[in-house]
């Protein structure tokens, strides 16, 4: 009869999991110095790829997939993949998201660049929360953005920013975003705060702020749920 030391097995499994997390973080740290440029280059190439459907992604570094070594794992990439699977058609992605962008910068810089598209998606507010943009200022800008978007656009509230004063600011701006979206029934709300509530440490990249592939999978749940049925 073979006796199994359950405690030893559990410690060994835990050690393997910790090692896997450390290796993933190490890979991310190694890629961090060039990640912004590499991700931007990826999305430029993706924009040139043909497709019978066009998705335009507006927003910040979360649209680009910062924090993950694979930019296609961002919410924009995962949304496109889900849309391709659902439609059976190739999706061209125009990612206009910019690292550090606020709602005001999307309104000023990104919105005028939107080409003809089958679907527009907007995710913004994390940098507004981090920079302490007052809720009423965010409300005015977010309202202007929603008013300018085509019917059927997907628009997210602010993700859960996990901890500290920035989390409290994000919660406040997420509530503002939902209030504004209620005034625009032609848009499709994305419940991003709810989908990202209490993320685990291993769902973040090496900067412990941006999601990694696992974290972006959490984001994608909300985005894909908001996709039209057909």
Image: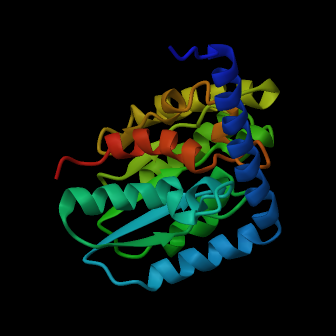
Does residue 133 appear anywhere in the picture? no
Nearest the viewer among 157 and 45 is: 45
Does residue 193 appear anywhere in the picture? yes
Identity of the residue drawn at 62% across and 79% down:
41
Nearest the viewer among 227 and 117 is: 227
Nearest the viewer among 109 and 202 is: 202
Identity of the residue drawn at 35% across and 75% down:
116
* 166 horizontally vs 86: left or right: right
Task: Describe the colour scheme in one phrase.
Answer: rainbow
- Indicate whether 49 appears above or below 30: below
Identity of the residue drawn at 30% across and 48% down:
227
- Indicate whether 27 appears above or below 12: below
- Indicate whether 9 appears above or below 36: above
> Which of the 4 image quadrants contains residue 81?
bottom left
> Which of the 4 image quadrants contains residue 165?
top right
Residue 36, image x, y percentages: 73, 68
Residue 26, image x, y percentages: 79, 55
Residue 222, image x, y percentages: 42, 39
* 147 horizontally vs 41: left or right: left
Farthest front residue? Answer: 1
* 4 horizontally vs 180: left or right: right
Report the label total.
0
Residue 7, image x, y percentages: 68, 15
């Amino acid at each position: 009869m073979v006796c199994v030391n359950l405690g030893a097995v559990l410690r060994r499994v835990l050690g393997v999991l910790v090692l896997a997390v450390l290796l993933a973080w190490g890979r991310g740290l190694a890629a961090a110095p060039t990640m912004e440029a590499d991700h931007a280059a990826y999305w430029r190439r993706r924009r040139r790829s043909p497709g019978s459907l066009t998705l335009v992604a507006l927003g910040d570094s979360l649209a680009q997939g910062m924090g993950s070594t694979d930019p296609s794992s961002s919410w924009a990439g995962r949304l496109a993949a889900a849309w391709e699977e659902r439609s059976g058609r190739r999706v061209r992605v125009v990612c206009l998201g910019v690292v550090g962008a606020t709602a005001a910068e999307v309104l000023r810089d990104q919105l005028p660049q939107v080409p003809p598209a089958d679907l527009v998606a907007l995710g913004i507010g994390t940098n507004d929360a981090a920079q302490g943009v007052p809720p009423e200022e965010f409300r005015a800008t977010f309202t202007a953005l929603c008013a300018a978007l085509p019917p059927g656009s997907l628009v997210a509230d602010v993700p859960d920013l996990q901890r500290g004063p920035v989390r409290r600011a994000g919660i406040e701006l997420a509530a503002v975003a939902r209030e504004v979206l209620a005034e625009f029934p032609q848009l499709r709300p994305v419940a991003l705060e709810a989908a990202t509530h209490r993320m685990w440490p291993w769902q973040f990249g090496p900067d412990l702020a941006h999601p990694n592939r696992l974290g972006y999978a959490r984001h994608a749940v909300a985005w894909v749920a908001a996709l039209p049925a057909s």
